[in-house]
Amino acid sequence: MKAGTLKQILLLTDGCSNKGEDPAIVANLANQQGITVNVIGILDDDQTEQPEGLQEVEDIAVSGGGVSQIVYSERLSQTVQMVTRQAMTQTLQGFVNKELRSILGKNQSMEELDPEKRGEIMEVVEDLGETSDLEVVVLVDSSASMRDKLETVKEALFDLSMSLNARVGKNRFCIYRFPGRRNDIELVLDWSPRLDGISKVFPKLTSGGITPTGPALRAAMYQFSKKQLRRNSDEEPFDMEETGY
Amino acid sequence: MKNHSTWKKPAISLHAQQIVTGKWHHKSYTVVRKIGEGAIGAVYLCMHHGRPVALKMSEQDAAVTVEVNVLKALKKVQGYRLGPSLLDVDDWQAPNGRMYSFYVMEYMEGKTLGSFIQQRGKKWLGVLMIQLLEDLEQLHQAGWTFGDLKTDNILVESNPPRIRLVDVGGTTRMGRSIKEYTEFFDRGYWGLGTRKAEPSYDLFAVAMVFIHIYYPRRFDRITGESSEKLLEKKLYRAKDLQLLHPILKKALKGRYLTAAEMKKDVMGKIKQVQNRRSQYRKKTQQKKAYPVKESFSISLVASVLWIISMLLP
């Protein structure tokens, strides 16, 4: 059994967007194109309460069909890989639910099945999660407040690639930071199966106080090869037929 | 079309005396208290028909289902107790109106490995390590890697002391990618191997479990320093583990391909120690025999002299 390709954007930020279009709307658009948007909000070590700006983190992920998590930077590595995996499972489950509805009627979904049947379906979902190919565009907020966290971000991304490369399926990653010097986003590392190379290329540069999350997400969306993006939102984001399932 | 049920479900927390009744099998459980919390949900001690059981509930339905699948698979290879036995799987409608998946397993009582060694002493190290390796060998033979092996997930039941593995959240089929791990025990974190599910992944964690007993606060990797050297240094400082040093070192390096191989080495070490002890005992016994021989020979000489003196006119 061979699965298709899952597409994800992983947004790492420590604050609220303050320029350009609403990121939640862009995330929704991306989700309609078959891309899942995950968001991780990074707290400073001395932050005891969740700052209000980070509410946006959950909003973006919900509209993007993905998973969000707010963490202290020491927990970043484990969180990044957990969020990525959870989102893969969620996407595949969404697909299975759709299939179930088309077979068993409108109101059927995995939750309505008894635990035994659900278990069997979950095995299929797990198999797909292990074997499907994965493409991730990593989008790193490089506003001034992120300066001290970039080292941890680098470690977490390296760790993520190690976790995912233990899978049977293939992986491709690329990293962008935002805002770029000239554009909304700036390339840090081009599509690559591993993230070992980032130690050399990760920028020490940080920009001022603007955080154009919305425009950055839109630009990230276009990094998936154009022909793969679906024009029609009704089309299956995860196409089994073309993959010989 | 947006499916509302895929939206983020709020985390769930049960309180004492709360009654959880399953939607499918209609069994009721009365919560006593929370006994643990992990990446996926929390475990509660509950009463069911006057008997204690452990109930795990999470807002992540998929994760619960995956764990149940593992427990079911382990049941099939039983005859040997690997992990807790599964008693019930069901859904519960919480007061907030949402459906939460849960499963019920046998309640295991015991001490954590660390506190057991602290109380009963280092002489138990070898025995418990052999037990642990035996369980892992069975698990590996059945096609599974335990994955999230850590001190918290190892209980020692008393009378007679027996190791039990709890929490199968990280248990992964051989050859796949490890589902869940804890950094300190994960060879990937230390840069000493991949996160592919294979026996050597668990055996690395076994070594870290025994190191952890002597560094209960754990320690971190140091950027720019070799983790292999760091772990070796820490290992050598744990003097109680001295006998097992070469074995643990080999496990950290990923040189054991099966748990059986490692177990054989541990047993060999224990035998060696026992032999040395009994030889030592023999020697001391020999020493004790000298004064007897001495006094015997003195009295013999004396009596010969006495007889001679009697014979002489």
Image (tube, rainbow, N blue to C red):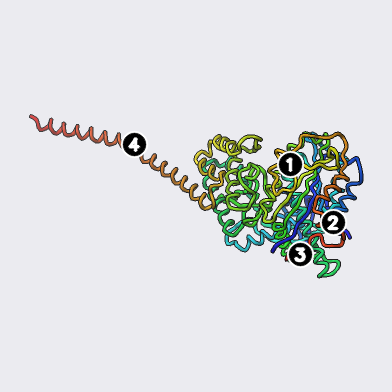
Identify the residue at horizontal 80%, vertical 36% (top origin). Answer: A146
Question: Residue A33: which numbered mark, if any?
Answer: 2
Q: Are marks 3 and 1 in contact (CB under 8 Å)?
A: no
User: Which kind of residue does numbered mark 2 sit on?
Assistant: Gln
Question: Residue A242: which numbered mark, if any?
Answer: 3
User: Please, what secondary structure does the residue beneath circle 3 have?
Assistant: helix
Label 1 chain ID: A
Q: CA distance from mark 3 to mark 1?
A: 38 Å
Tell me, yes or no, if residue B12 can be seen here. Answer: no
Label 2 chain ID: A
Q: Position of residue A219 (x, y in %)?
A: 85, 47
- Residue at the disc numbered 4: B288
Q: Specify few, some or many for label 1: CA neighbours under 10 Å numbering under 14, 14-19, or 20 or more.
A: some
User: Which kind of residue does numbered mark 3 sit on?
Assistant: Glu
Q: Specify few, some or many for label 2: CA neighbours under 10 Å numbering under 14, 14-19, or 20 or more.
A: many
Q: Specify few, some or many for label 4: CA neighbours under 10 Å numbering under 14, 14-19, or 20 or more.
A: few
Identify the residue at horizontal 68%, vertical 51% (top origin). Answer: A165
User: Which kind of residue does numbered mark 1 sit on?
Assistant: Arg
Residue A110 quadrant = bottom right
